[in-house]
Image (tube, rainbow, N blue to C red):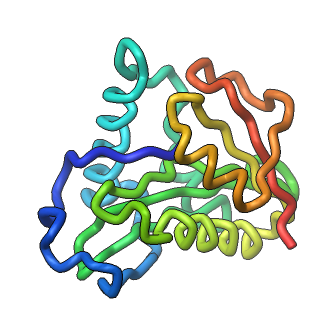
Amino acid sequence: MSAGTGAGPGPEPDAGLGAGADIAIVPEPPDSATAAALLASYRGELAERFPGGFTPPPGWAAAASQLVPPNGAFLVVRSAGEPLGCGGVRVLESGVAELKHMWVSPLLRGRGVGRRLLAALEAEARALGCATVRLDTSPFLPEAIALYRSLGYTEIPRYNDNPLDAIWMERRLG
């Protein structure tokens, strides 16, 4: 799923985050305080967007051990040093990776940062030996769905038992 809130640490919208802002996408330990804060912002936005709020079901969050090599990776988007986005990728099965918890702060949306983060996550999937990337998402996240479709993700049959999602997609990496 991909979404964003204004919640969490970070500069105000006009605090030097213009189109030329320094953006870096870097590995981060998935159990770090930075990762926890970003994932809390992500969950906060899901709570705002989902009718009735958001309560993660058991097994919803990827375990930290699944988001570090050789099983996966966790990346953080930094703008002027501030952490303002994140995403993970994990090996789901031989040759197939899964995107997890992709989120970009509203402060950076509309600037191609989500597209850059997704490309970085796909590069991590390739480095893990995967030729296909899958994801699950919600119809309450139309911007995420539009991004995925624009980059060649297509809908596939359900591949997991996530009760919060209704859309499953994949892309073969070139």
Horizontal and vertical percent position of residue 140 = 51, 29
Q: Quadrant of residue 173?
A: bottom right
Horizontal and vertical percent position of residue 36 = 30, 50
In this rendered view, identify the residue nearer to me: 17 or 159: 17
Q: Is residue 21 left or right of residue 95?
A: left
Task: Say if 93 sits above or below 173 in the image.
Answer: above
Residue visible at 63% across and 48% down in the picture: 146
Q: Is residue 128 left or right of residue 80?
A: right
Residue visible at 81% across and 56% down in the picture: 171
Q: Quadrant of residue 137?
A: top right
Task: Say if 76 sits above or below 161 in the image.
Answer: below
Task: Say if 170 sits above or below 84 in the image.
Answer: above
Residue visible at 24% across and 76% down in the picture: 17
Q: Quadrant of the N terminus?
A: top right
Task: Say if 118 sits above or below 54 in the image.
Answer: below
Horizontal and vertical percent position of residue 81 = 24, 79
Total tally of numbered discs in the picture: 0
Q: Is residue 151 left or right of residue 20?
A: right
Q: Quadrant of residue 43?
A: top left
In this rendered view, identify the residue nearer to me: 165 or 26: 165
In this rendered view, identify the residue nearer to me: 83 or 147: 147
Residue visible at 44% across and 44% down in the picture: 3
Q: Quadrant of the C terminus?
A: bottom right
Horizontal and vertical percent position of residue 53 = 35, 19
